[in-house]
Image (cartoon, rainbow, N blue to C red):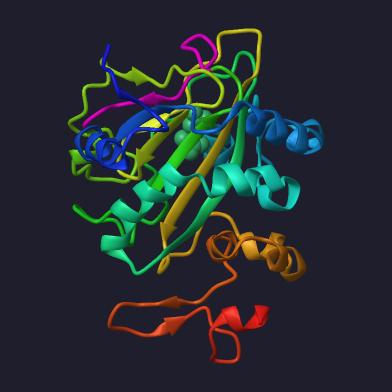
Amino acid sequence: MAQLSHFSSDDDATAVIAALERDGGAIVAGMLPADAVTAIVEELGPALAATASGSRDPDPKWQVFHGAATKRFTGLAVRSRAFVDHALLQPLLLATADALLLPHGSDYWLNTGQVMAIGPGEPAQVLHRDEGNWPEARRPGVELTISAMFALSDFTIENGATIVYPGSHLVDAAASRSDDGVDLDDPAYAVMPAGSGLIYTGKVLHGAGHNASAEWRYGLHVSFVVGWLRPEEASPLMVERALAMELPTRARELLGWSSYYSRGGGRTWLVDFEDAALLFE
Ligand SMILES: O=C(O)CCC(=O)C(=O)O
């Protein structure tokens, strides 16, 4: 079985970044302190209870991708301040995003903060690369997106730990969800206790594992995308200005309440042709 490198949240970010560049993914223990896990689980509890399994999209492709026994919801900054303080602003995740995304854009923003809770019996997810969201933009050597899957419950092979193919980020697959040239018989599994996180690049082939257990596998996904691309989640349509005003400046920027300055190009996401930060003065 292939392996990913393991780190602790106290380790130097440069070692984690080197592992991401080599393998496409790495596991970091203790990314969320135990009390943060407790607070996030408690604050997201009502939304988890209110969310039905499966997709409401009529397209069978998205129903399969979502998973009939999987619960997904976003808008996490609205529902959980602990999510903002501990997951969105997780220092090691931001350090890896700085290292991998800033060479390809002057800033990045939240792609999605998404609960991915996998119910008993759910088959393994379709393997994919997250950069497949943007087929028009993806190209070799350009990192568009970086993700973390935080474990809010223990992840095991039996309950659907994320499957990752180390090295598959270096394969220039012909299509965004292609597995061309990847040895599918040799996966790594993100087996990790609650509070740990799997950090992975947008180029690595991965997917949720089969949940063959009787328990729910509770995952919290946070991903960032370069600021010149449209994110998966429409965060500013969820996070109102009054809430944005209360948040730390970096959280507010990541959630879409900020303008983007292309290097050597124009400014975008403006308000009255001015920087969106002026909304908060
Ligand atoms: O739930 C997981 O382990 C991975 C899910 C995933 O990669 C996705 O839905 O994009």
For the point 40% across and 33% down, the residue is 10
Residue 159 painted magenta: yes
Is residue 132 at least partly visible in the picture?
no
**Which of the two residues, 272 or 251, is positioned nearer the viewer here?**
251
Prevailing SS of the magenta stretch: loop
**Which of the two residues, 18 or 48, is positioned nearer the viewer here?**
18
**Which of the two residues, 259 or 249, is positioned nearer the viewer here?**
249
* Position of residue 131 in the picture relative to residue 88 (left or right): left
Instruction: Report which quarter residue 135 is drawn in.
Output: bottom left
For the point 31% across and 19% down, the residue is 187
What is the magenta range?
A: 155-167
For the point 34% across and 33% down, the residue is 11
* Position of residue 5 in the picture relative to residue 22 (left or right): right
> Relative to residue 68, is residue 227 depicted above or below?
below
Residue 101 painted magenta: no
Is residue 162 at least partly visible in the picture?
yes
Instruction: Report which quarter residue 179 is drawn in.
Output: top left
For the point 40% across and 69% down, the residue is 228
* Position of residue 31 in the picture relative to residue 249 (left or right): left
Q: Position of residue 89 (x, y in %)?
A: 53, 49
Image quadrant for the N terminus?
top left
